[in-house]
Image: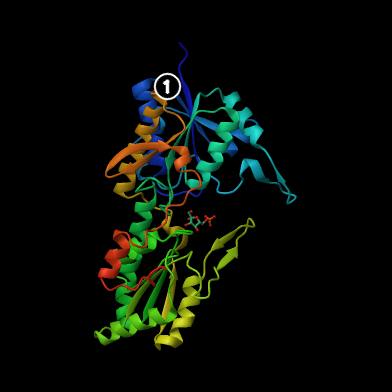
Amino acid sequence: MATKRIGILTSGGDCAGLNAALRAVVHRAIRNYGWRVFGIRDGSMGLMERPLDFVEFDLSLVTGDMLRLGGTILGTINKGDPFHYPMPDGTFRDRSSEFVEGYRELGIEALVVIGGDGSMRILNQLCRQGGIPMVGIPKTIDNDVAQTDYAIGFSTALDVAGEAIDRLAPTAASHHRVMILEVMGRDVGHIAINAGVAGGADVILIPELPYTLEGIANKIDDVRAEGRNHALMVVAEGCRTETGESITKVQSGGEARYGGIGQYLGARLADLVDAETRVTVLGHVQRGGVPSMRDRVIASAFGVHAVDLISSGRLGRVVAWQHGQVVDVPITDVANITRAVDPFGTLAQTARGLGIYIGEMPA
Ligand code: F6P
């Protein structure tokens, strides 16, 4: 009987722990099942290039050093949807059939996709079109993939944001300042609320909850009344201004990204609270670096389980972390669904219980 061949790719923004997941997939597939594993470069691009752009893994390529390595050795892209592929002349083309043909040319029988909710939607659509068996592994620092408590990369990003608050606190105290830390997270506030609680912030703003400038100013007044002359504030990049506008910038490559709400609030608050404000934008630092131990463990468990799903013919599923266990759910329960911070969940209630201003109660 011919040896089974599977493919694996990383898609969307990179994060810490992707290489640990690749390593786990390769180990499980080769050691346990004797399969061949092909790593597809640059997300879906590797199957659209001619010649195809891939590497065949063997165990010598996936040593323990992969656990310690940030980014993805396969490369990734977070634009270039094959159904709506941006061409150099500014037009868009449907290149989905090139992806499917590439899959056939490589001669693989299933695809492991490591991606966020957006990548899951696109890859699921591609795989359905081409009759390609697929399993998914969730990753994103934003931690907004539905059905899973943790996506690969979140834990490391949280550690980075928490360390930033630890570093800002003493300088805030020394200069009697209001220090504002803007963190990533796209449309959700998981990094902000977790880092803010862990770092002892006085104010945490997340896109899921409305706030008022007055509410922030009142909290800073309370802090002063308690005898402290400095304050720490964490704001998620996806928060809007108090009048509802989101702050974005068009980046090179032509796509808009969040960024700037921290500066905006810093300027508004400086007058309102009569204090010096300083703003730190953490940016892509949260995506890089050495993966946390938790990300390595989650990525390893996800990788092993994903291969077992293929082996048992349970396809069209995504692995997930629920209540300390790895489970799997249908991809349709995950694709393009955003898991927001629950305004009445444990984290929000904990923050309120600690006296942190996290905005107004939703209507
Ligand atoms: O989705 C991950 C993420 O890092 C978001 O938190 C952030 O808004 C976005 O990607 C940044 O994208 P890019 O790397 O294209 O600037």
Amino acid, disc 1: Trp
Q: Position of residue 210 (x, y in %)?
A: 44, 70
Location of the C terminus by quadrant is bottom left
Q: Is residue 176 visible?
A: no
Q: Is mark 1 within 8 Å of ligand 1?
A: no
Q: Secondary structure at mark 1?
A: loop
Q: Is residue 358 left or right of residue 134?
A: left
Number of numbered callouts drawn? 1
Who is closer to the viewer here, 2 or 290?
2
Answer above or below: position of 195 versus 144: below
Location of the N terminus by quadrant is top left
Question: Quadrant of residue 170 in the image?
Answer: bottom left
Residue at 55% across, 48% down: 78
- Extreme-top residue of the structure: 1
Residue at 24% across, 84% down: 226
Q: Position of residue 180 (x, y in %)?
A: 40, 73
Residue at 40% across, 89% down: 274
Residue at 57% across, 37% down: 125
The colour style of the image is rainbow
Q: Is residue 237 visible?
A: yes
Q: Position of residue 154 (x, y in %)?
A: 38, 52
Q: Which residue is mark 1?
A: 35
Question: Quadrant of residue 356 in the image?
Answer: bottom left
Q: Position of residue 96 (x, y in %)?
A: 64, 36
Who is closer to the viewer here, 331 or 170?
331
Answer above or below: position of 32 versus 340: above
Answer above or below: position of 174 versus 132: below
